[in-house]
Each structure stands twice: as C-alpha cells, then as structure tokens.
Amino acid sequence: MKIILSTGGTQGDLNPFLYLGEALRDKGAEVLFALNPFDKLKAEKRGFEVITSGEPFDVDEFIRKNTDIATLKGAPKIWRQGYLPRQKQMYEDITKAIHSFRPDAVVSHPLCIGSQWAALDANIKHVIICLQPMPVFSVSDPSIISLNDPLKFTEPALLKKVLSILTILRSFVVRKYMDHSLKKVASDIGIEYKGHLFSDMFSRADLILGLWSGDFRGYADDDPKSLKISGFPFPVKSSDRDLSDEVSAFLKENPSPVIVAMGTSARNIASDVYDKISQACDDLNKPCILVGCTDPSITEKYTKIMTTPFEPYDKLFPSASLIVHHAGMGTCANVFKSGKPSVIIPFFADQFDNALRAERIGVAAKALSRSKLTVVKLRSAIQNTLNSPETREKAEKLAEKLRTAVNGSVAGADEILRLVK
C-alpha cells in the first residue's frame, strides 16, 4: 500500500506526521511525504522520500517577526500570508504525485486544502488529521478561542442553548471566511469550486483521525461519523538522544525542578514570560530549567535557574516537580505522559482550548492569561499546584493510562490501513 502524507506548519504540526509515517512504514506501507522545502531535511533524516511544494516557509521565524500572532488577528494573518498562497502549488504538486506515485490514500493536515482537493479530484481515499479537537467544530463540545471566551462557561444548563447558538455562528463565520479566500485559488487552478468548499472537506473525508486521547476529549454527540480518536501520537521508537551534560549535572544538584517548555513557536515571543517565571521560582527557592530560552541575562539575575536551547521532552519531563507550558498539543502529550502537573500560559490558536481541557480533567491549574501575567500570579499558581495532592494524583493516573495505551501513531496507522484495505 502507498500513502502520501501532506503537512506544513510548526514542528508541532510536522512531528505527529513523522511518527505516523514511521508507524505506517513499519506496517509495510510505502510512504511519500509532501512538505514545504523548509521541512524536507527533517523527513529525509528519518529515511522518507519527500516531494516539496512552494517556497521555503519558516513558521517559527514568521511568528518571531509578527508578535501580533498571539492575538485574535493572528490566525487570519498566518492563514493569509503563510498557508493560503501555497494552496495552488500544493494542489498541482500533489496531483502530479498522485499520477506518478499512485497512492491508495492521501493523508493531510486540515490546512493543506490543496492536497485535499487533489485527492478529491483524483477520487483517492482521503484522510484528514486533526491534531487537536478544535477543527472538528463541535457544538455539543465546543472549543474556546481565548480565556475570556463565553464558551468557556458551557457547564451551566441555562447557558448551553445560547452558547450552542454562538458556536454555530462562530463556525459559520470561520467557514465562510475560508471559503471566500479559497474561491480565487480554485479559479486560478481552473477547477469548478463545487464540492471543494472548506466546509465540505470534513464531510467528504473518508476518515478524520483525531490524534488525542479519549481521556482528554472523548466523542461528542455531533462529531462526524468518520472521526476516529486514536490517541496521542508518540515516536514509534524511543529517542536515542540523551539529556545534555549541562542539564544532567544541574539535575544532580537541583532535583525536581520546575521545567518551562514553550514549544518551538511560542518561545519566540516568550522572553517576558521566561523572566517572570524565573523570578517566581527564585522567590520560591525552586530550581528551574527554561527549555528554548536564549536570554543569557536570566541566569545572571536569578539563582538555580538554567537555560537550554532544547532537550528531549521524554527524557527531561519525568524529572520535573511541575511543568509550565503553553499547551501546544505536542507538549501537552509529553507532559501528560510524564505524569507531572501543569501550570499553563496559552499564547494563541488551539492552546486556549487545550489549556481548558487540561484544567477540566484535573491535571493542570486554571490557565494564566499572558497579557495579565504577573510574578505574584505565577508564584501563587506554582505553589498551589505543587501543594495539590489531587492534581498530582490525577496527573499520575492519566500518565499510567497513556503509558499502557496503544501509541496513537500506531493506532492511527492501523485506522488508515484499515480504510484502504
């Protein structure tokens, strides 16, 4: 069997596809990746064949230069300037790949619309990968887009009807916006924009794969019938990368530190957050490791604070007493599997919704607003979470479930192969 995997975006968008590709390959499938040139080497290092589409696009650098991305204007901006201009070329390149590679299925990220259209027009089985619940647009289990979102308060029965209407209106606006922006792309390609609507893609997909745990978000009453929740995706083989010597030495002298991990994108606009967390930990006399922080002044100002450009999460997180993070889905998966409680500071996109869901299942404190973040609030959140046996117990129980469950990458590969068989 032959599978095309098409994705783009941050490292958090690429990694789950790489893990899925490895699982498919281990099961005997022939895998072809369709990627932005910027990500080509990352897939080739894992032994995959890669075709590229469009000009190189570094999402992390884009976020670094556009700090307003962490606002409600951020999502439309990154769509208009980052993803939308690539759809025409993506459609043409995936169409060529379908003719030459002759795949049994095309598996794509929700924002790789061009690859979805190519599969639709070639009458090829098509799978959409949802890395988080937000793209499903559920009304009965709605997602939030900010910490002030009224949908955050959907528990009271009297509000549910009103909030359901708000969810319907919001999803209608998003879909109309996407459809309007994609019409010109379809015209440039020369295809009739019929059945190619953004709002049609989920209903037309042969399989929608939710790469998260059912404990994080189970099936909702109005989920598409084609949705299968496979679990959080992890590498098929354990990483052979060890902790740096500097971090290993720090942990020997400072056991159970607070660990701060802001992924590959949020860290680019998190300098103020790193500083406030450092001060809070210093006030509490808690050692702290800042992953992704490159500000040398922090270690000069505070004691028992260490910065490191990157460490393997699966090796580092189990040594923490608590993890402060942004609620990117890849980071969430590793935090949950480590069994450590969280303090969350979401920045943009799905992170607000992920943070709320982590709070609801009891493994994280109430998320902190980045715009209203203070050292006092951080100090209180860290101390209260560390002193909460209930939060620790729930985090440990979730971790035990994830460690014994089938790897979401493997379960997802099984679903795809079952579809094409």
Image (spheres, grey):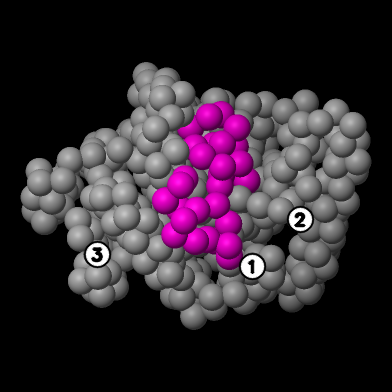
Q: What element carries label 2?
A: helix
Query: What residue does disc 3 label?
Result: 302
Q: Which of marks 1 and 2 is in front?
A: 1
Tell me which numbered mark, 1 or 2, is placed earlier along the sequence. 1
Give percent across and percent down for residue 147.
Answer: 66, 52
Q: 370 and 245: which one is in front?
A: 370
Tell me which residue sits at (32%, 55%) in the image: 283
The disc labelled 2 sits on which kind of residue?
Phe
Q: Which amino acid does label 3 sit on?
A: Tyr
| Residue bearing mark 1 | 71
Tell me where residue 342 sits by quadrant: top left
Is residue 252 in view from this perspective?
yes
Marks 2,3: beta carbons within 8 A: no
Q: Do the residues bearing badges 1 and 3 touch, measured as CB atoms within 8 Å? A: no
Residue where numbered disc 2 is placed: 198
Task: Please tell me which residue is depicted at 22% across the width and 67% down the height of the picture.
Answer: 299
Q: What stretch is highlighted in magenta?
A: 353-381
Does 376 lie within the magenta span?
yes
Question: In the picture provided, is 90 more to the left or to the right than 261?
Answer: right
Q: In which quarter of the image is residue 262?
A: bottom left
Q: Distance between the residues labelled 1 and 2?
A: 23 Å
Dot 3 alpha-carbon crowd within 10 angstroms: few under 14, some 14 to 19, many 20 or more: some
Q: Distance between the residues labelled 2 and 3?
A: 50 Å
Measured in 3D between alpha carbons, the distance from the residue under mark 1 to the one under mark 3, in whole angstroms, is: 30 Å
Residue 47 seen from this side: no
Q: Residue at x 61, y 41 (%)?
A: 356
Q: In which quarter of the image is residue 90?
A: bottom right
Measured as percent of width and height from the top left, residue 357 is found at: 59, 37
How would you rate the neighbour count of disc 1 (Cα within 10 Å): few for under 14, some for 14-19, many for 20 or more?
Answer: few
User: SS at mark 3?
Assistant: loop
Does 60 appear in magenta?
no
Residue furthest to the bottom in view is: 65
